[in-house]
Amino acid sequence: MDLKQKLTDYGCGVEFVDIALGYHQFYNPEHDIETFIEYVEEEHAKVEAAEAQKEMDKEIVDASGLLLEFEDEKEI
């Protein structure tokens, strides 16, 4: 039985199966499918956290320039 079928039979949704297939090189048929699912969940959580951090870094505003602009407007 192939990995996709094992994941589907275990009850994984289509989205998770697609994600898990991206980690197929780490699947060891000698271990149970639960071990692989846990691995995928942990590793993909790290990827999602890194992506979220990148998005947050993009949203951080350098407030020092805003303060100077505000002070200039007060003088007017």
Image: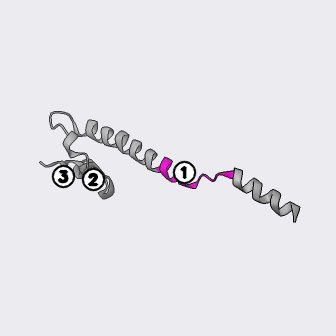
Q: CA distance from mark 3 to mark 1?
A: 37 Å
Q: Name the foreground residue: 4 vs 55.
A: 55
**Residue 19: % across, % down:** 30, 52
Q: Earlier in the sequence, mark 3 or mark 1?
A: 3
Residue placed under numbered mark 2 in the picture: 17
Who's the residue at 31% across and 42% down the image? 40
Indicate the secondary structure of the residue bearing disc 1: helix
**Residue 73: % across, % down:** 82, 63
Residue placed under numbered mark 3 in the picture: 5
**Residue 13: % across, % down:** 31, 55
Mark in front: 3 vs 1? 1
Residue placed under numbered mark 1 in the picture: 56
Q: Earlier in the sequence, mark 1 or mark 2?
A: 2
Q: Residue furthest top?
A: 30
Q: Name the foreground residue: 26 vs 7.
A: 26
Task: Give the amino acid type for the residue marked by disc 1 in the picture.
Answer: Met
Q: How is the image coloured?
A: one colour
Can you tell which mark lies on residue 38? none
Who's the residue at 31% across and 38% down the image? 39
Q: CA distance from mark 1 to mark 2?
A: 28 Å
**Residue 50: % across, % down:** 44, 45
Task: Give the amino acid type for the residue marked by disc 3 in the picture.
Answer: Gln
Q: Is residue 22 magenta?
A: no
Task: Give the amino acid type for the residue marked by disc 2 in the picture.
Answer: Val
Q: Earlier in the sequence, mark 2 or mark 3?
A: 3
Q: For residue 43, what is the image quadrant? A: top left
Give the extent of the magenta segment.
52-63
Q: For residue 38, what is the image quadrant? A: top left
